[in-house]
Image: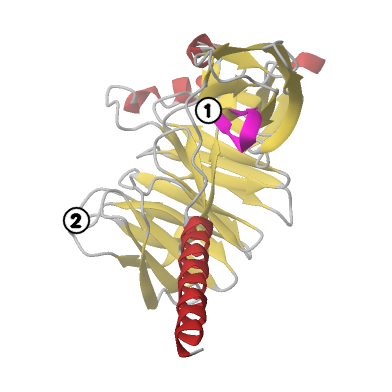
Amino acid sequence: MQKLYYSFLFIIIIISSCNNTSNKHNSQHNKTPFRYIKSIQINKRLKNTIWKQNTNIPIEIEHIRKNKQIDSIEIYLDNKKQNTIYKNSFKTSLSIKHGKVGTRRINAIAYHPYGKKGFNSIKIQIVPDKEPTRYSFEVIKTYKHDTTHFTEGLFFKNGFLYEGTGIKGESSIYKIDLNNNKTLFSRKIDQEYFGEGITALNNKLFQLTWKSKKGFVYNINNFKLESEFEIDTEGWGITTIDDNLVISNGTNVLHFINKDSYKIIKKLEICDNNGPINYINELEYIYPYIYANVWQKNKIIIIEPTTGKVIGIVDLTSIITKENNFLTDNENVLNGIAYDKLNKRLFITGKRWSKIFQIKLINSEKH
């Protein structure tokens, strides 16, 4: 009887041990991330072509592991499902009618028997299918501009013009009464910094620096320095949309940044119908679009801030001709956009120009 008891106890211990081992393996399995197998390849030529919106983009999937049967393939655009291909039909198409331009990602997930999945991803370039509207302009009025000001930022608020200038040892911010060209007060930053774009949000003035990845926050009423901040990019131009800062860095990408944490919320690529627009510089948000200078170009581009599309171009060549006493220096380029929201006045200037111009845009395609 005693032998029978110990035999029974031994069996119980063995069973319990097996169950614990099984549970342990199951627990480890649940913690292991799903691993895709390399069974498919999206046609590589897609990434070497610029695709226009409202154009059918042919998608071909190569089955590179023939021993892995494919039941279906799901096609995603930026993680949003677009289409499903069944069985051995490895061709489909996408038509991107709306949304952001610039870099988009096509993902393909292949479903194999026994729960296996294959995955492949590829980046493509999308541009608008329409050319930007062309604008000319009319000069309404001119104002004097200090020719020592290497203009990097400009905005208008509560009846006054604010200007930020560059060059190490000269970089400053100014509050100016346009009516008499009087500087009401100014502040110079440390000579180690190259001042860049400026903007206002609530009662604060934000100033960028070029390569230092640092910015400054001032009380807009007295230019008292309140704080400093760091950003993970160069600083070129800056404006605000709602409660976010929007920053350019000389590429075709705008960075939307939280005003409190200074963390990047999103990035927006800027393209016209021919491709990316690089060297985006000074910015001004004039609802509902962003107006931007392009470094060393005689134009302002008008950007749709939800998609990155360039929907308009303002040709300012004739104004720059009038400023030809500065054209011998390639640094003294068009740069500076400000908007008087109350009186609907648009101002533009350039680096070390002698004038600030109030202009009115004219849709060239309607004349």
Query: Which residue bears the numbered disc 1?
Result: 121
Q: How crowded is mark 2: few (under 14 residues within 10 Å), some or many (20 or more)?
A: some
Q: How many C-alpha atoms fall within 10 Å of the one at disc 1: few (<14), some, or many (≥20)?
A: some
Q: In the figure, is residue 132 to the left or right of 24?
A: right
Location of residue 278 with respect to 163 vertically, above or below: above
Is label 2 or label 1 in front? 1
Q: Which residue lies furthest to the front in this view?
A: 1
Q: Name the residue under label 2.
A: 169
Residue 38 in the image, given as x and y percentages of width and height: 47, 26
Q: Which residue is drawn at 44% across and 28% down?
A: 278
Q: Is residue 112 magenta?
A: yes
- Residue drawn at 39 percent across, 36 percent down: 250
Quadrant (top left/top right/bottom left/bottom right) for the C terminus: top right
Tell me what residue is drawn at x 71 percent, y 24 percent.
Answer: 72
Give the residue type at disc 2: Gly
Name the residue located 73 percent from the left edge and 48 percent from the top edge.
Answer: 344
Indicate left or right for 97 with 7 as reference. Answer: right
Residue kind at label 1, given as amino acid type: Ser
Q: At which x and y percent is residue 80?
A: 70, 37
Q: Is residue 78 visible?
A: no
**Who is closer to the viewer here, 366 or 347?**
366
| Residue stretch rendered in magenta on the structure | 107-121
Q: What element carries label 2?
A: loop
Q: Which of marks 2 and 1 is nearer the N terminus?
A: 1
Please tell me which residue lies in front, 280 or 264.
264
